[in-house]
Image (cartoon, rainbow, N blue to C red):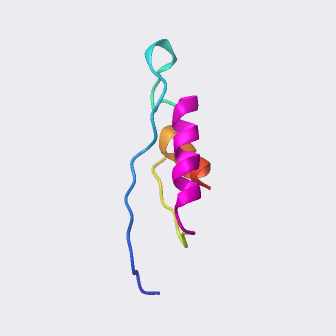
């Protein structure tokens, strides 16, 4: 398999204040933004992410 493109994305916005925890989960705004970006992006053959909840949640929300 030849790699044609590599896209690097950071996680979407996370919760703030008291809701912020270790690895912090996405905020509702972050989930909505990740879904919108995912809908505008093409299909991906492979997705790699860290074990951080915010990174996993971003990848899932992007579809």
Task: Judge whether 63 appears above or below 3 on screen.
Answer: above
Q: Residue at x 52, y 42 (%)?
A: 33
Q: Which residues are magenta?
A: 27-43
> Residue 26: in sight, yes or no?
no
- In the displayed structure, 24 sits above or below 45; it is above
Q: Is residue 60 left or right of residue 48?
A: right
Quarter-of-image position of residue 6: bottom left
Q: Nearer the viewer, residue 55 or 29?
A: 29
- The residue shown at (53%, 69%) is 46
Of residues 61 and 33, the one nearer the viewer is 33
Whether residue 48 is visible = yes
Q: Position of residue 15 (x, y in %)?
A: 49, 25
The number of discs equals 0
Q: Position of residue 12 (x, y in %)?
A: 46, 40
In the image, is residue 22 part of the stretch drawn in magenta?
no
Question: How would you classify the magenta stretch by its main secondary structure?
Answer: helix
Q: Is 22 situated above or below 35?
A: above
In the picture, which quadrant includes the C terminus? bottom right
Outermost residue toward the bottom in this view: 1
**Front-lying residue, 60 or 41:** 41
> x, y (%) of residue 17?
44, 14
**Residue 44: percent from the left, percent from the top?**
54, 69
What residue is at 47 percent from the left and 54 percent from the top?
49
């Amino acid at each position: 398999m030849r790699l044609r493109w590599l896209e690097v994305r950071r996680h979407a916005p996370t919760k703030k204040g008291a809701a912020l925890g270790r690895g912090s989960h996405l905020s509702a705004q972050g989930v909505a933004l990740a879904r919108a970006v995912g809908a505008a992006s093409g299909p991906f053959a492979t997705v790699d992410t860290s074990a951080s909840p915010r990174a996993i949640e971003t990848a899932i929300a992007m579809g």
